[in-house]
Amino acid sequence: MSQATQIRVPTTKVGPVRTHSEQVKYDKQHAEDYDHYYVMLRSEATDLLVRARTPVYYLDEDRRPILGEDGQPKIRSPFDASLDVWAAWGADEFEFIVTNRGAMAIVTPQGLMGHIESVEAAKQMGIIPGGE
C-alpha cells in the first residue's frame, strides 16, 4: 500500500505597491537599519571580487559601539570606512567598486575620488590639519 505525499506550496504575500518616492524612503530606512557597510573591491590582476564587511559605528577595543555625548553610537564616515578597507586589501592591487549600507549604494568611485580631492584641497587651504 502506498502513501500519498502532501506537498505544501508556500504562497508569496505581495506587499503594497509603492510610488518611486515611497520606495526611495523605504530603501533609506532599510539601509539605516544595517550596522555594517559592505565594500566591494575587484582585483585587477585576477578579477577576484571581494565583499568586505566593516562596522558603521566606531568601536572600542571590545568591539562595542562608542557612544557620543548624545548617547547615540558614533557613526563612521562611509568614505573613511571605504578608504580603510581599500587600504587594508591593497589599493595598488584592488579597484574600488562601491560601498553599500543595506541595499543602498552610498559611495561610488566618483564620489570617493571627489571626497579625496576635497580633503586634499581643505588641507592645502589650512581648513583641516595636515596641509603644507
Image (tube, rainbow, N blue to C red):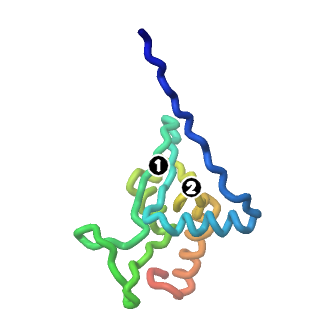
Picture quadrant where residue 84 is located: bottom left
Foreground residue among 17 and 104:
17
Gap between marks 2 and 1 measured at Cα:
10 Å
The answer to whether 107 is drawn above or below residue 90 in the figure is: below
Q: Residue at x 54, y 64 (%)?
A: 31
Residue receiving disc 1: 51
Q: Quadrant of the N terminus?
A: top left
Residue receiving disc 2: 98
Q: Residue at x 58, y 78 (%)?
A: 121
Q: Are marks 2 and 1 in contact (CB under 8 Å)?
A: no
Picture quadrant where residue 57 is located: bottom left
Foreground residue among 53 and 97:
53
Q: Secondary structure at mark 2?
A: strand
Q: Residue furthest bottom?
A: 69
Query: Disc 1 residue type?
Result: Arg
Q: Residue at x 56, y 39 (%)?
A: 10
Query: Disc 2 residue type?
Result: Val
- The location of residue 101, given as percent across then percent down, is 52, 62
- Indicate which disc residue 18 carries: none
